[in-house]
Image: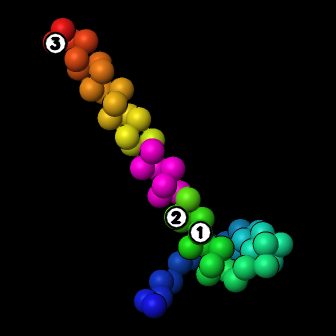
Amino acid sequence: MPRVLISMSPEFLDKVDTLANSEQRSRSEYIREALRNYMRRNRAVNVHKAQQDAKALDELIG
């Protein structure tokens, strides 16, 4: 699996590690899951925004 290097403050990393440990996950597993959730949520927001834009455009052109 490819590796990615990211930077974060020590305080933030401590929070990540605390949460990962509380769920008995590795740091990498916890961050991967957080990114999957972010991407899923962001995709849903984008779909909703596109639907709103389409409705507004439809109302404009009647």
Left/right of residue 38 with respect to residue 17 in the rendered view: left
Which residue is disc 2 drawn over? 36
Residue 18 vs 50, above or below: the answer is below
- What are the residue bounds of the magenta stretch? 38-44
Residue 24 % position (x, y): 79, 79
Label 1: state its secondary structure: helix
Distance, label 1 to label 2, CA atoms, is: 5 Å
Instruction: Tell whether position 40 is magenta.
Output: yes
User: Where in the figure is residue 17, as x and y percent of width and height?
Assistant: 76, 76
- What's the amino acid at mark 3? Ile
Q: Please say whether residue 18 is one of the residues in the magenta stretch.
A: no
Task: Confirm whether residue 14 shows in the render.
Answer: no
> Residue 55: image x %, image y %?
30, 21
Residue 4 appearing in the image: yes
Q: Main secondary structure of the magenta part?
A: helix
Distance between the Cα atoms at labels 3 and 2? 37 Å
Using residue 33 as the reference point, say whether residue 45 is left or right of it: left
Could you tell me which residue is drawn at 60 percent across and 65 percent down?
Answer: 34
Q: Secondary structure at mark 2?
A: helix
Direction from residue 24 to residue 38 in the image, left or right: left
Query: Counting residues from the N terminus, which is met first, the one under dot 1 or under dot 3?
Result: 1
Whether residue 25 is situated above or below residue 53 in the rendered picture: below
Residue of label 1: 33
Image marks 1 and 2: residues in contact by CB distance under 8 Å: yes
In which image quadrant can residue 51 be found? top left
Q: Earlier in the sequence, mark 3 or mark 2?
A: 2
What residue is at 45 percent from the left and 91 percent from the top? Answer: 1
Q: Spatial distance from mark 1 to mark 3, Cα to Cα?
A: 42 Å
- In this rendered view, identify the residue nearer to me: 44 or 7: 44
The residue under label 3 is: 61
Q: Residues within 10 Å of mark 2 (few under 14, many from 20)?
A: few
